[in-house]
Amino acid sequence: MKSSMHINQNLSQRLGFSLLSLVMLITVIPILAVIVYIILQGAPAISWEFLSGFPRDGMRQGGILPAIVGTFYLTLGTAIFSVPLGIAAAIYLAEYARENVVTRLIRIAIINLAGIPSVVYGLFGLGLFVFFLKFGTSLLAASLTLSIMTLPVIISAAEEALRAVPQAFRTVSISLGGTRWQTIRRIVLPQALPGIITGVILGLERAAGETAPILFTGAAFFLPRLPNSPFDATMALPYHLFVISTQVPEMPFQIQYGTALVLIAFVLGMNLIATVIRSRARAKRQW
Amino acid sequence: MDKSLDWREYVITRAIKASGYSAILFVGLIFIFLLREGLPALADVPPGDLLSTRWYPIENYFGILPLLSGSLVVTLGAALIAMPLGLGSAIFIAEIAPRWLREILKPLVELLGGLPSVVLGFLGILVLSPNLRTLLDLPTGLTALAGSLLLAAIAIPTIVSIAEDALDSVPQSYREGALAVGATRWQTIWRVTLPAARSGVLTAIMLGIGRALGETMAVMMVTGNAPVIATRWNSLFMPARTMTATIAAEMGEVANASTHYHVLFFIGLVLFLISLAVNVAASSVVFRQKKRAERILS
Amino acid sequence: MNKLIIQNLSLQYSDGTESLRDISLNIPSNAITVLFGPAGGGKSSLLRCLNRLNDLTEVRVVSGKVLLEGENILDPNTDVIALRRKVGMVFARPVVLPLTIRGNLTYGLELAGEQRKSRLDEAVERSLKLAALWDEVKERLGEPGIALSGGQQQRLCLARVLANQPEVILLDEPTSGLDPLSTAKVEEALQVLKQDYTIVLVPHSVQQAARTADYAAFFLQGELVEWAEGKEIFTNPQNKRTEDYVEGRFG
């Protein structure tokens, strides 16, 4: 009796574990398949001309340079606004804020910012930056919109990195006559930097791949030149991929896959850099 | 102490404190602008018409029920797919996989979270929907189901990541206690670990569904964008149109400050309030759990 | 002469429980004053009050004064930065800042705005010699501080305080993690240092208290039981509880 129950338990455990393994496979295989498939389909399209040329023939031929450069500018613009603000906000939360109602409110606001649908950011950017502040449909308006969307990611990651720095360093620095800011600048920030950079890159990676927030704030369907001022609209890789896969009839598959490949290479490349920085910093850490 | 240092410190400290409040400022600004641009919709369109079943803006029909229904069907479908897969994967990674495998699987799933949704939408058009069409013998593959599948792919990384963290933070002693009284690992997972992590798991599911609800590009590209109300069980196999997709597809073409423009902002306001509710609920679960922990510790 | 005069000081933890009750104590200059007693007696809290590090923690001053050369340092208008340069602190665990050995030593001076290399070099050498560490590390000042052994790290922490040229040095069980040899080196260094500094030490054992004390104060559950010259308290304690503790009947 007892042993048959034991067998039953073992059997159900084995069944259960097999089921979960299967679930894991169902989750993981499509991820790998998607990436491998895009690489295989897109690789033939990649050439110097594709990367450095302008689109021709209604985007059915030529290259995607303006989209690549546009995404680069947008990412840079997002970084300019969101990185200083995000890190400062994280410093406030990790080093200055006391646990009170206002701090609780700030945390709820951050969680909410992280959860707002990206297209709502697009609406907000349209209302505030494009119309109210009269930036027009521009790199500037789109970058600002993306910055606010990226902010919660950067704040959360940076706060976590700051909190990971041992409290004893702060106590010692203060005991040696350091002010709070000197302590942060000379000890805490340098120690938290790798973690902060990782978080920043992951936030910017998200911004680089987003389409909805820039749809009405800065993305251009087609531009025969590169943007040369923050008030110009710009092409961008994700929006370009959207355009050539839904708005342009008889689009050659190769160019579509090529564009998709460049986009995921851009985004996953950033991811890879973040991962490398994180693991290197962990290996070098002195505490 | 040197005076210049004093004032520099003062300015920097002020700037840092001001930045600290920026998150509140932005949530407030977003809300204000959605209200400012969205509320006029209520003046332009009688509330009864807004809650009607016909969305046909060119002829001034602004019933948002089909869009609500579209979002609901697509998100529900996504939740049904993502919940078992996401939780199963989280349990597998946290409780069953050996360390080396975990070090591979977790980043891999997070990689999926990093894929731009437009790439998923693109593959949805070219690969997923043609296959769905032949497989299920449908008139078109661009259906709510296709949207649900892509949204599931978008929700899964969120669910796995948060649920795995929650499972991982259950103290090892709980598991050891259960194993010591003769429970199998399988029983331990179901009777001890999962219940102990339940608030984190709940948060994971809520935030995953929240992400799916707010997702725009992938859904817009594959759901066929037909604003029809889901009335029957097979609505999942028909085209649908979500609130997010409607905004994204139509905002580019409306005249500034027209009725249509205001209604689209109104839909944005509804989305904002839904995400606010989801996130406040999710975070209060976390807070409650923390408080409980504090009470236990003190 | 008394460097520090503590008058009727009461401290409280933030949850309202009492940390120290109505302490009055004089701390003479150019001597080692030892604050000893069982754990939880409030010695560390008192020590942290002396350079206002309690501002960072959960300990609050309820009443009383601490006079440093006649000035009440608990006054809200006290320049705490200047105070902490004057009153340095060495902690129980050696906390080496994530900088080079030299960087650890020059840290305090750089915070104060000192940039002249000659001054910094001079401070590094002087403080390392005072902490009896110079010969061991003079060739490796550019290495990370963490590369030193535990005993060396603690002397580095002492040297780091000395580099600030303080007047008072507070030590909170500075040898609790060290082997006997390293402990002896620290104690030797303190015997030399007391000629120029006022030293307040929370020892990690009664034996250390007896070895090092010029003056000693016995704390029990937030109360100052008695204080006197070291010789006096360890050979002829006035209070029964002090006697019991010193002779090892509880602890």
Image: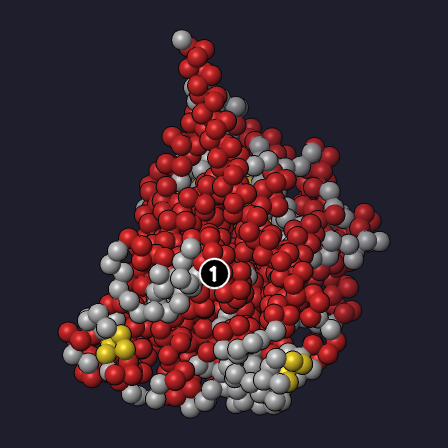
Q: Is residue C194 above or below residue B297?
A: below
Q: Residue at x 57, y 48 (%)?
A: A29
Residue B193 position by quadrant: top left
In the displayed structure, does residue B195 sit left or right of residue C121?
left
Q: Residue at x 77, y 64 (%)?
A: C121
**x and y percentages locating residue C232 in the rendered image:** 54, 33
Q: In the image shown, does B138 or B184 lie closer to the viewer?
A: B138
- Using the image, determine if residue B193 lies above or below residue B20: above
- Residue to which mark 1 is pinned: B129
**Amino acid at pointer 1:** Ser
Is residue B116 shown to the viewer in this render?
no
Is A206 or C72 nearer to us in this picture?
A206
**Residue at horizontal 63 percent and vertical 40 percent from the top:** B100
Residue C72 location, quadrant: bottom left
Count all numbered tags in the image, as a single digit: 1
Q: Who is closer to the viewer here, C156 or C32?
A: C156
Sort mark 1 into few (<14), some (14-19) or many (20+) by Cα contacts within 10 Å. many
Q: Is residue C63 above or below residue B171?
A: below
Q: Position of residue A67 (x, y in %)?
A: 60, 79
Instruction: Tell me if I can see residue B61 in this picture.
Output: yes
Tag 1, which chain?
A: B
How far across and how far down the image is residue C90, in percent?
Answer: 60, 49
**Looking at the picture, does residue A6 appear above or below residue C20?**
above
* Secondary structure found at label 1: helix
Residue B174 occupies which quadrant of the picture? top left
